[in-house]
């Protein structure tokens, strides 16, 4: 989905500005490692995902976090930090001419991150933090906010109102599963439809987080477990339900990933899946 006459940001904005529910626009695939890895690994993941998305007619947004401030254990790897992380992200964006997404956990991170990335992402546990939402909103950068695992879809209206009141004009609501007792998330597709309708009131698209929806939070004691084998099933179901953006974490060697190794999708599975998803979307357009 590249266009030599426009920047990655322009192409992303054109996708966004077509409205919240447009079956005929390209599938947006937000993909990359959970936390930034070495430049070699980041670039390999971006290269393979970009090739798969280009071949299938999808649009890639490369994602990775410079800091994972909500790891289960204090001993868990959090990432390279803001300064180095933004340099690494900038390298990927420049090398592959793709839009970028990263998480921010504190209000002070929003403005410097917005100078490099095209989408600021607010993690699910922080989705109600007013100061963080406003700090992201006033940057003028697009904002994706994940629905907290503890929220009903209807409660996301308040979250999106905070972004709207801050001046944010491009926002996205992301579903990532809802707590169903200890160590278990459930993907509620009735709720996903509700979230889509609520987001549409703000001209906001809805995204489905494939890999985090397979997570078993804290299921391994000092880390989360997961069912990554169910990721492709959930992705297919979300696209069939009309969702136009997917978020997934992928890695060339999940067992060695710095974060979320229990849920990241193997790169071979992820690249093969893109073609299937775009074919499902074509059926909806027919």
Image: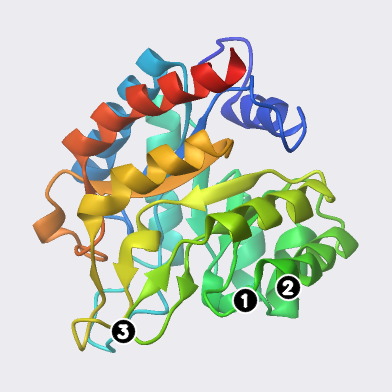
Residue at (30% x, 49% y) in the render:
231
Q: Are marks 3 and 2 in contact (CB under 8 Å)?
A: no
Camera-side mark, 3 or 2? 2
Residue at (40% x, 85% y) in the render:
181
Residue 151 marker: 1
Point out the tag, 3 or 2, that comes first from the N-terminus.
3
Residue 45 spot, x, y in % from top left: 26, 38
Q: Nearer the viewer, residue 55 or 90?
A: 55
Residue 72 marker: 3
Up-down: is 85 above or below 178? above
Q: Quadrant of the C terminus?
A: top right
Residue 179 falls left or right of residue 265: right
Quarter of the figure with residue 130: bottom right
Q: Which residue is mark 2?
A: 155
Residue at (68% x, 57% y) in the render:
195
- Looking at the rendered structure, the secondary structure element under dot 2 is helix
Camera-side mark, 1 or 3? 1
Distance between mark 1 and mark 2 Cα atoms: 6 Å
Residue 29 falls left or right of residue 233: right
Residue 97 spot, x, y in % from top left: 47, 26
Residue 100 spot, x, y in % from top left: 50, 42
- Looking at the rendered structure, the secondary structure element under dot 3 is loop
Q: Nearer the viewer, residue 196 or 268?
A: 196
Point out the tag, 1 or 3, that comes first from the N-terminus.
3
Residue 252 spot, x, y in % from top left: 16, 43
Q: Nearer the viewer, residue 97 or 123?
A: 123
Q: Is residue 141 visible?
A: yes
- Looking at the rendered structure, the secondary structure element under dot 1 is loop
């Amino acid at each position: 989905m590249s266009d030599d006459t426009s920047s990655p940001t322009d192409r992303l904005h054109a996708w966004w500005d077509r409205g919240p529910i447009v079956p005929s626009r390209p599938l947006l695939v937000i993909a990359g490692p959970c936390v930034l890895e070495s430049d070699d690994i980041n670039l390999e993941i971006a290269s393979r995902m970009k090739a798969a998305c280009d071949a299938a007619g999808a649009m890639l947004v490369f994602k990775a976090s410079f800091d994972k401030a909500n790891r289960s254990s204090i001993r868990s790897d959090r990432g390279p930090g803001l300064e180095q992380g933004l340099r690494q992200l900038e390298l990927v964006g420049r090398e592959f001419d793709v839009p970028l997404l990263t998480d921010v956990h504190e209000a002070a991170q929003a403005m410097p991150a917005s100078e490099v990335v095209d989408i600021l992402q607010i993690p699910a546990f922080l989705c109600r933090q007013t100061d963080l939402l406003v700090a992201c909103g006033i940057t003028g950068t697009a904002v994706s906010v994940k629905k907290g695992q503890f929220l009903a879809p209807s409660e996301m209206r308040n979250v999106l109102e905070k972004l709207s009141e801050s001046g944010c004009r491009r926002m996205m609501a992301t579903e990532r599963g809802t707590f169903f007792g200890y160590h278990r998330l459930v993907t509620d597709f009735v709720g996903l439809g509700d979230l889509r309708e609520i987001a549409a009131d703000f001209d906001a698209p809805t995204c489905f987080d494939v890999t985090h929806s397979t997570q078993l939070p804290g299921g391994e004691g000092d880390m989360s477990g997961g069912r990554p084998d169910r990721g492709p099933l959930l992705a297919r179901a979300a696209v069939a339900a009309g969702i136009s953006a997917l978020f997934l974490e992928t890695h060339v060697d999940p067992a060695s990933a710095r974060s979320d190794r229990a849920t990241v999708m193997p790169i071979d599975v992820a690249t093969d899946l893109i073609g299937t998803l775009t074919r499902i979307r074509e059926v909806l357009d027919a």
